[in-house]
Image: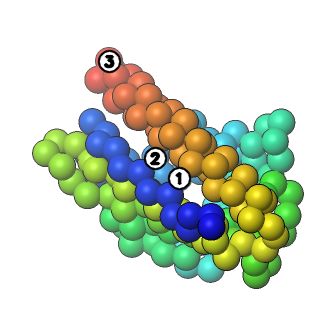
Amino acid sequence: MVPDRIEREIVIDAPVDIVWAVVTEPEQISGWFSDSVELDLRPGGEATFIFDGHGTVHGRVERVEPPRVFAFRWVAGHGAEVADGNLLLVEFTLMPEGEGTRLKVVETGFAQLAGSDDERREHFDGHRRGWELELGHLVAYVAERTRESAER
């Protein structure tokens, strides 16, 4: 049986408004996640993540509750169009923690993906590894951005 949920939590040394911008503004997202982003930041809005060398991932925005919750559905594989049976839900929840922000990322829907158990497991394992890597990039991106702001 393929697990349905990936959950990660990190604490970022920046206030919630900074982290909100980093996870919702295309020019910020492209600094830590995908190489470029097209994002209509409203429920039902289109989302397109372009990963150079890996392809394009399409999706749609589900929830926008500044500065606490941002959620989108996206296609499990690169290059496919949005359709029933191939969408995963990614939810970012931001909570103040001291002078920083606790960021919780939950991605669900792996058990309901179309395809074989092996294909679903491959998506799950790839996304689990991906979130570990990308959230590390996010922390480094925020730290660099904060350092640059302090130097000005």
Residue at horizontal 46 percent and vertical 72 percent from the top: 64
**Considering depth in this image, is 76 or 79 the residue closer to the camera?**
76
Q: Position of residue 67 (x, y in %)?
A: 34, 62
Report the amino acid beneath label 3.
Answer: Glu
* Mark nearer the viewer, 2 or 3: 2
Residue 85 against residue 11 in the figure, above or below: below
Circle 3 residue: 151
Label 2 packing within 10 angstroms: few (<14), some (14-19), many (20+): many
Q: Residue furthest front?
A: 1
Label 3 residue SS = helix
Q: Position of residue 110 (x, y in %)?
A: 64, 67
Residue at horizontal 37 percent and vertical 56 percent from the top: 104
Label 2–label 1 contact, CB within 8 A? yes
Report the amino acid beneath label 1.
Answer: Glu
Q: CA distance from mark 2 to mark 1?
A: 6 Å
Circle 2 residue: 22
Residue 5 against residue 51 in the figure, above or below: below
Report whether 62 appears left or right of 116: left
Report the amino acid beneath label 2.
Answer: Val
Picture quadrant where residue 43 is located = bottom right
Residue at horizontal 81 percent and vertical 54 percent from the top: 78
Label 2 residue SS = helix
Label 2–label 3 contact, CB within 8 A? no
Q: CA distance from mark 1 to mark 3?
A: 23 Å
Residue 77 against residue 140 in the figure, above or below: below
Picture quadrant where residue 59 is located = bottom right
Label 1 residue SS = loop
Q: Position of residue 84 (x, y in %)?
A: 76, 81
**Considering depth in this image, is 1 or 50 the residue closer to the camera?**
1
Label 1 packing within 10 angstroms: few (<14), some (14-19), many (20+): some
Circle 1 residue: 25
